[in-house]
Image: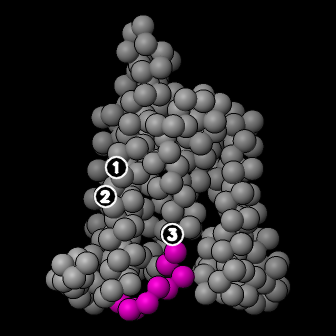
Amino acid sequence: MNRIITWLRMTAWTMEPPAPYSFFHIAVTAAGVAAAVLLALRLERPAAAGRPDAGVFRVSRILFACGILLAAGELYKQLFLYYVVFGTYNWWYFPFQLCSIPMYLCLLAPVLRRNDRIFRAVCTFLQDFGLLGGVMALAEPSGLLHPYWTLTMHGLIWHILLVFIGLVLTFSQIPDRTVRGYLATLPMLAVFCAVATVINVATGGAADMFYISPFYPVTQVVFYELSLRLGTGAGICIYLACLCTGGWLCHLLARRLHMRIQKPAGN
């Protein structure tokens, strides 16, 4: 453990936290998203002839690989925060935000793909809400920019990976792009919100999972002001309604992108 702590401290390269929409933020985001788009397009290809499950198998492997990368990054972040930044565990950084859920679902992909209905629903969730979380965090990056290079790059790369995952699924044949397909993601979202609420309450307000803690106003921009004016409960309800709306808009966008990318192939 002493070697790990020494290594963590060796990687504690300090930096002036970049300002949102600074050259650094825009350049890294633009380069990362461009790479995510190009790689997702490169990996998109029809299932092998005679193997209708080949696309599912390929996508599950891609998701699992992304899950490994996300888990490795999260492990580093948690250790870094504990041993370098705080010296104690800070529940505020517990990995159960909307943007954390893809890590768990991707790691479970090889198991989930054994059930076609469940796998399609999970992939639809990742396509809609994973993409939403990645795009929104990159668009409003105040929570990603830290006084350490490794934490800042971790936050940016994490959400670029979410965009990549969403695009891989958008270009694939797996998600259900119907209205019913979107509606099937809402029970999953409800379960995740319920778990987040249990964590928030159990920690007495030390955690703010999904930004729906009952102990203080919603901390997300715009919704914070609404919570102050209308009350925390109303702010949470409005925030969750907007979250569902954002997932629906990503669902519609994914359907359009999928149809567009399939046109050259005659689909």
Determine whether the residue tagged by mark 1 lies in a helix, strand or loop.
Answer: helix
The numbered disc on residue 156 is: none
Quadrant for the N terminus, please: bottom left
Q: Quadrant of residue 73?
A: bottom left
Give the residue type at disc 1.
Ala
Q: Nearer the viewer, mark 2 or mark 3?
A: 3
Residue 92 lies within the magenta run: yes
Q: Residue at x 37, y 40 (%)?
A: 62
Q: Which residue is mark 3?
A: 95
Residue at (34%, 49%) from the top-left corner?
Answer: 36
In the image: residue 225, left or right of residue 90: right
Is there a contact, CB below 8 Å, between mark 1 and mark 2? yes
Residue 72 found in image quarter: bottom left
* Residue 74 picture location, percent across and down: 39, 67
Quick check: 21 left or right of 192? left
Q: Secondary structure at mark 3?
A: loop
Mark 1 burial class by Cα count in 10 Å: few <14, some 14-19, many 20+: many
Q: Amino acid at mark 2?
A: Gly
Q: Position of residue 183 (x, y in %)?
A: 75, 43
Magenta residues (range): 85-94
Spatial separation of the CA atoms under disc 2 and disc 3: 22 Å
Can you say whether 168 is above or below 85 in the image? above
Disc 2 marks which residue? Answer: 32
**Closer to the camera: disc 1 or disc 3?**
3
- Residue 147 position, x and y percent, is 31, 88
For label 1, the residue is: 36
**Residue 200, percent across and down?**
67, 78
Give yes or no for residue 38 being in the magenta stretch. Answer: no
Asked whether disc 1 touches disc 3, contact meaning CB atoms under 8 Å apart, the reply is no
